[in-house]
Image (cartoon, rainbow, N blue to C red):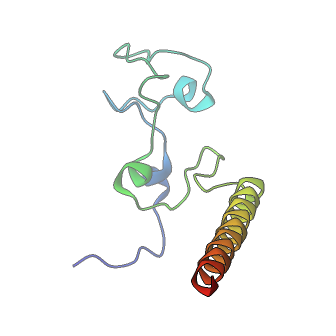
Amino acid sequence: MIEKVKTLDLRLLKKRCVACGYDGSLLRDGRIDQCPCCGCDLHERPPRSYAEMEGLQREPVSGHSPFVDPEHQERVIHRWLAFLFLSMVGLLAIAYLCAAAMAV
């Protein structure tokens, strides 16, 4: 049965080459484009920790967040509010025209 992970072993957080498992200092610093052991392209398949690959971490260790930035989220909310407002105005206009057509 899967339970919530409360602590992670530091070995699970070490970035490794996904092809061969190399975890040297060159790989951790991000100074190279290919793995020194197997030649794997690190831009195509970036090094990841075991915790990242297994989903034990909610956010990657690299520092960038997978979540949407607040500015983008605010723009989406404004767009939805504008859409709803214009939809309501359109429905009211259609209802008014229908009522006017029925009265004639």
Q: Which quarter of the rendered picture does the N terminus lie within?
A: bottom left
**Horizontal relation, residue 82 to residue 61: left or right:** right
Is residue 84 positioned above or below 40 on the image?
below
**Horizontal relation, residue 3 to residue 8: left or right:** left
Q: Residue furthest left?
A: 1
- The residue drawn where x is 66% and y is 70% is 84
Is residue 96 positioned above or below 16 on the image?
below
Observer-nearest residue: 8 or 66?
A: 66
Q: Position of residue 62 (x, y in %)?
A: 61, 43
Name which quarter of the figure residue 18 lies in. Answer: top left
Q: Position of residue 58 (x, y in %)?
A: 51, 62
Observer-nearest residue: 95 or 2?
A: 95
What count of labels does the image hold?
0
- The residue drawn where x is 39% and y is 77% is 4
**Horizontal relation, residue 14 to residue 64: left or right:** left
Is residue 81 positioned above or below 99 on the image?
above
- The residue drawn where x is 49% and y is 22% is 43
Q: Position of residue 8 (x, y in %)?
A: 47, 64
Q: Residue furthest bottom?
A: 103
Q: Which quarter of the rendered picture does the C terminus lie within?
A: bottom right
Q: Position of residue 70 (x, y in %)?
A: 75, 59
- The residue drawn where x is 42% and y is 17% is 41
